[in-house]
Amino acid sequence: MSNSLKGFYKILITLVVALGIGAIFILAIGENPIAAYGALLKGALGTKLGLGNTIAGFTPLLLTSIAFAVAAKGGAFNVGVEGEVILGGITAAYIGVNWGFLPVPLLYLACFLGAMAVAAAWAFIPAVLKAYYNVSEVCVTILMNTVALYIGSYLVSGPMSAGTATPQSDPVLVTLPKIMKPSNANAGVFIAIVVVVLVILIVYKTKWGYKIRTVGTNPAFADYVGISSKKVFISTMLLSGMLGGIAGCIEVLGVYGYYLDNFAKDLGTNGMLAALIVKSNMTTTPFIALFLAVLKAGSMAMQQATDVPKSIVDTVSAIFIIIATMNFVVSLRTRRKAEKAAAEKRPQDPSSAGTEGKGGSK
Amino acid sequence: MEVFESLGKIFNVSLIYATFRASTPIIYAALCAAITQQANILNIGTEGIMLVGAFTAVAVSYFTGSWILGVAAAMGGGAVIAMIMAVGHIKYDSEICAIGMGINLFAIAITKFLMQVLFNTNGTFSDPAIVPIPTVHLPFLEHIPVLNELLNDWCFTEWFVIIFIIILQFLFYKTVWGLRLRAVGQFPMAAQTAGINVNAVKYQAMLISGLIGGLAGAHLSLGYSTQFVENMTNNRGFMGVAAMYFGGANPVLTAVGCLLFGFSDSVGARLQAYGFPAQFVLMTPYLVTVIVLAVSMAIKLGAVKKKQSSLVTG
């Protein structure tokens, strides 16, 4: 309990520091940071349209952040979620446009399953390369994102093109209902929440989840007790890929109703950001995803209201993760120092020795 | 016959220079990653260091009218970014991939922000006031047909990269500092026992890496082109990291890996003229990078296994 509370404080402090640095940037260009942040919040939450846009932005972010987090739980640094979103989206669009012979409920299912399968297959490549040939998955997934982007772009400007000026596919036959018109918020948000809850349950309450966490913590130990670390690693990446695929499918069926070229821009990156801020803690990641969605949705309103460029939001989020990756150990060190001092004062105290051991194991 | 004619147009003498030209920014990036890899730090932030360098170079060159100041400032900027990473990773124990990606995102965001604030534009900033890195014109080559096409009018930093590869090769494998650097990378505890200040060496490696990364960026924005474009590094930093893996952080082998990517890039650009879809052309270097990375790692792994098994049986 005290640990999670500390984690919460840590995020809060990091957030304040990041926003503070952002405020300095805003001051430096001669604007008022309080007015800017106020305009941002008002834009994201103050109006019905803004709130809808926040929800619409939150939906894919929730899935991509959990996709990154679940891969991290299994020991993979999966930067390739964006590519998985793209390929999931294009698959959903292909099935949604061309498989009209299926009855409607089955067509929904086919879209989602198809998107999941293709995205998982895409994630399978870096997973195998990492597991069997020790090729850095960071490098491979980053490069494969670009390849996925061009595959999608080729398909919608060539074979699947709707013949319009902007590269996009024909409209799909089934769409997810919009819940807060005129914004892009759609029923996909409920699917996303259900999926994320399921994934969290899988990771923390099932045997497979236990294996994932074991392999992520210590693959050698996993192999020693008879868990094939390679196979579990690959299965984790497949799960991560499926989540990316679902995100792509929801974007296509829910937000656009067709595949729009480059629709997934930054979806994977921002999901990764959300997960990195809380070190891929799966229960807090969704809240960070929501927070980032608020920032993104409000940034446009801020730019219009106050002349502060919306790229300040990306700058602040990036500073947020840079500090978040470090800060933890700072607090741990000071704590450990304090504990050491306490232990030296009262060497026979068993409770302080216990906590020190716990701190040292991390 | 037509096929041969087309092939002749694609694979001609100018392809050699085109390959080298496309490779140079990646070579700098790969060397930036190689020096930290020798100290066992995977420099995922190469991309970000490079991007900041590219922006600083253009901005300083624009305001001062001096390309030397631009390049120097870019190297300084790269060093600052690298030191943020170094402090985070070495002192505060952050995971290198996490902070590296943070740095990359920060670089994209801050350059975008500064471009809007300083130059009031989005997307691309190009201006006649930006002074590029000069090209080296060799008058005595003018009358030699093939060599003139091959070697004349190279950008100054393109010549420098060749010298630089040799300098780094020498530094890594022939100097005391290089020995220490590699010792720190391979067995930090032994290095420490031998009296080497492990963290100091790591900081030095990161600092030099930042300087090189900044230079990589400056070459990209002042030598390779004369402008700054949003996210203009376009994954070249990651290609550099991949090439570094390919060459096992050995500067010469790493540069060879970069040439491979540069080659696929240049051939791709020429194929576009023959009706290949642009997207396939654009994805070629990325695809080649992944394949080369996979194959080189597989071969390396095979070699290690072979060594192990011969030890066991012998």
Image: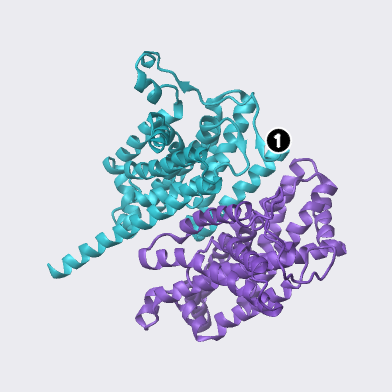
Chain colours: A purple, B cyan
Judging depth in this view, the residue of B76 and A254 nearest the camera is A254
Q: Residue at x 30, y 58 (%)?
A: B299
Total number of numbered labels? 1
Residue linked to disc 1: B118
Q: Position of residue A294 (x, y in %)?
A: 75, 62
Q: Residue furthest right?
A: A47
Q: Residue at x 49, y 53 (%)?
A: B44
Quadrant in the rendering for residue A102: bottom right
- What secondary structure is marked by label 1? helix
Q: Quadrant of the N terminus of chain A?
A: bottom right
| Residue A145 pos. (x, y %) | 54, 56
State the residue lying farthest toward the left.
B314
* Three-letter amino acid code of the residue under disc 1: Leu
Residue found at the far front of this picture = B1
Residue toward you, A348 or B213: B213
**x, y percent for residue B283:** 51, 49
Question: Which image quadrant for residue A105?
Answer: bottom right
Whether residue A136 is visible, yes or no, is yes
Vertical order, B202 against A195 (above or below): above
Mark 1 Cα within 10 Å, few/some/many (few <14, many 20+)? few
| Residue A161, picture quadrant | bottom right
Q: Looking at the picture, does residue A200 appear above or below residue B274?
A: below
x and y percentages locating residue B123 in the rendered image: 67, 40
Residue B197 appears in the rendering: no
Residue in view at x 40 percent, y 37 percent: B7
Q: Chain of mark 1?
A: B
